[in-house]
Amino acid sequence: MKQKYSLHLLLLVLTFLSVTYREFLFVGLFTLDWETYITILSSEWPYSVGLIVILFFHEMGHYLPARYYGVKATLPYFIPFPLGPIGTMGAVIQIKERIPDKLKLFDIGIGGPIASFLLSIIAWVIGIFLSKLMVIPEGMDKSQFLFFGDSLFTYWSGQLILGPYDTNLFDISIHPLAKAGWVGLLITAINLLPFGQLDGGHVIYALFGERYRNWIHWLFLGFIFFTLLNFTWLIWSFLIFYLLKVEHPFVPDSQVELRGVRRFLGYFMLIALAFIFVPRPIMMGNEIDSPTLLRDILTILKNTIGGV
């Protein structure tokens, strides 16, 4: 029994270290600068704990319904990734058998996004109240800084709590808890993408059944459009097309209609995706003011049409 849970615990500890120290982790292993380790821990623990709690309850939102319905599933596997600004690639559970019908598919699929959506909003709102606006110095070189993009929700809530303010003149000195909320919302949005084996794929298939195959590839083409705004979505397009798949596997009772609370929650979470989706998630400072590929294409078209 101890051996069964040891891997889960080890990955949890490694993910905590990865999320807390991120790019410093490997450098710190060579320098053994314990004072710096303690300083980073004292400032970053709200981000680490907040994000791990969000990820844990997201996976519990899948695990508990699965166990309730007698579907075999593992406890969460956390995935450390100390090379980027987030520090993790999330967490996963493994469903060890086929989900037998659409109602169970929906309940297991939507539980995770609902949990992380609510907890991420709470973390973001509390964190933004603890954050401060700072003036962007005139002529500041932004090229060496990372900037986190806004969704409709984070922009409007930030303006409501700290603003109104001009984003060209001010930036948010973000509290670590708000950053945990931001990452949690990003992970929730990615999971809600309505394709294949993603949570959103389960939800949209449960809502529309087999008839959704008539238009899901058109929706995928629309998703590829976001590549023109940020190349992050090109990577996800490849992952979805080749690994996660665009279409959801067949479920025998796909013709059964969802009703009542399930139907409401399904549509609510798909609509919520539009408000928490971040078109340009993480950017270097020199990318912020640079025209996107979409703007370049529109400029070329405008000049071409205008010259005719």
Image: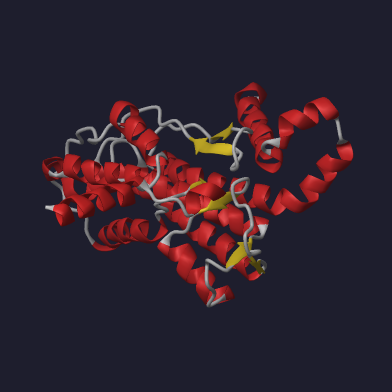
- Whether residue 197 is visible here, answered yes or no, is yes
Number of numbered labels in the structure image: 0
- Which corner quadrant of the image does residue 127 belong to? bottom right
Give percent across and percent down for residue 284.
54, 46
Identify the residue shown where x is 56% and y is 75%. Answer: 161
- Whether residue 284 is visible here, answered yes or no, is no
In front of the other: 67 or 271: 271
Q: Considering the image in quadrants, where does the N terminus appear? A: top right
Identify the residue shown where x is 51% and y is 76%. Answer: 160
State the colouring used for the structure image.
secondary structure
Give percent across and percent down for residue 13.
69, 34
Give percent across and percent down for residue 151.
43, 59
Left or right: where 242 falls relative to 137: left
- Which corner quadrant of the image does residue 37 belong to? top right
In front of the other: 149 or 197: 149
In front of the other: 179 or 12: 179
Give percent across and percent down for residue 77.
55, 32
Q: Is residue 237 above or below residue 43?
A: above
Q: Is residue 124 above or below residue 14?
A: below
Identify the residue shown where x is 32% and y is 48%. Answer: 296
- Which corner quadrant of the image does residue 15 belong to? top right
Left or right: where 211 falls relative to 203: left
